[in-house]
Image: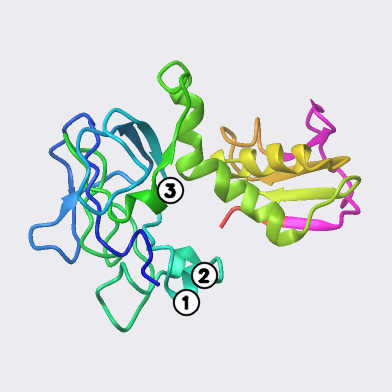
Amino acid sequence: TSHPSTTLGNAPINRKPTTRTATGPNEGGGPFGHENMGEVIEVGSGVEKVRVGDRVVLPFNISCGFCKNCERGLTNYCLTTQPDPSTAGAAYGFADMGPYGGGQAELLRVPFCDHNALRLGEDAEEKENDYVMLSDIFPTGYHATEMAGVIPGDSVVIAGAGPVGLMAALSAMIKGAAKGGFNSSSQHRGRGGGYQRWEHDRWRPSVEHLPRPSVEFVLDRS
């Protein structure tokens, strides 16, 4: 049985141009930009679900949806989209992750777009600053809580208070974690550095020389 994404579908997306390039397997490099969203202006003959005019957001990993790794849920190790037989996995605008340009360009070509493009609702333009988080930062933080198996009532410590760490904290709250905190050496990302606590949905002030907390999980931003 043929898969609806076996024929490559092209879905260029409007983006602002850039002259910055990254060294990659494609000769001369290509544009950066792995957190992409925009409006579809053209579709290929193999595309069945996505339509011209749809506003979509894309995961930064590019996958086919039907290879053995994708069928196991390991879309970041897709075997179809990576032309190098010695490795797996592809992404927009990353060196050594396939010949795919990033979204800091006027147009972006989206392979297997029925599988990769998430169509957004009527409020897509109004809430684009929220929806763009679905391309990388929020799913990465949420996936950390999935891998850790966070459940209601758990206590969580997150190593690093950058964007992914903040999304991991938000995800832990969504999952019902009772309390947690950040360990951060950054004066900017850690709200002053040190250990920062939260309980349910409330931030607590920094406490110096805080004893080592008793927690079920530690989530590392790396």
Q: Classify residue 90 by image quadrant.
A: bottom left
Residues at discs 2 and 3 in contact (Cβ within 8 Å): no
What range of the chain is rendered magenta? Answer: 194-218
Locate residue 110, reporting x and y percent. 27, 49
Residues at discs 2 and 1 in contact (Cβ within 8 Å): yes
Residue extending farthest to the left is: 28
Q: State the mark number for residue 59.
A: 3
Compared with 104, 90 (above or below) is below
Locate residue 89, reporting x and y percent. 38, 68
Compared with 45, 200 (above or below) is above
Residue extending farthest to the top is: 126
- Work out whether residue 32 or residue 120 is closer to the camera in this orientation and state it: 120
Q: Residue at x 81, y 37 (%)?
A: 208
Q: Residue at x 56, y 46 (%)?
A: 139
Q: Give the main secondary structure of the magenta stretch.
A: loop
Is the image coloured rainbow, by chain, by secondary structure, or in one colour? rainbow
Compared with 147, 129 (above or below) is above
Q: Which residue is mark 2?
A: 71
Q: Residue at x 56, y 41 (%)?
A: 138
Crowding around mark 1 (Cα neighbors within 10 Å: few <14, some 14 to 19, many 20+) is: some
Mark sitting earlier along the chain (1/3) = 3
Say what amino acid the circle numbered 1 marks: Lys
Crowding around mark 2 (Cα neighbors within 10 Å: few <14, some 14 to 19, many 20+) is: few
Q: CA distance from mark 1 to mark 3?
A: 19 Å
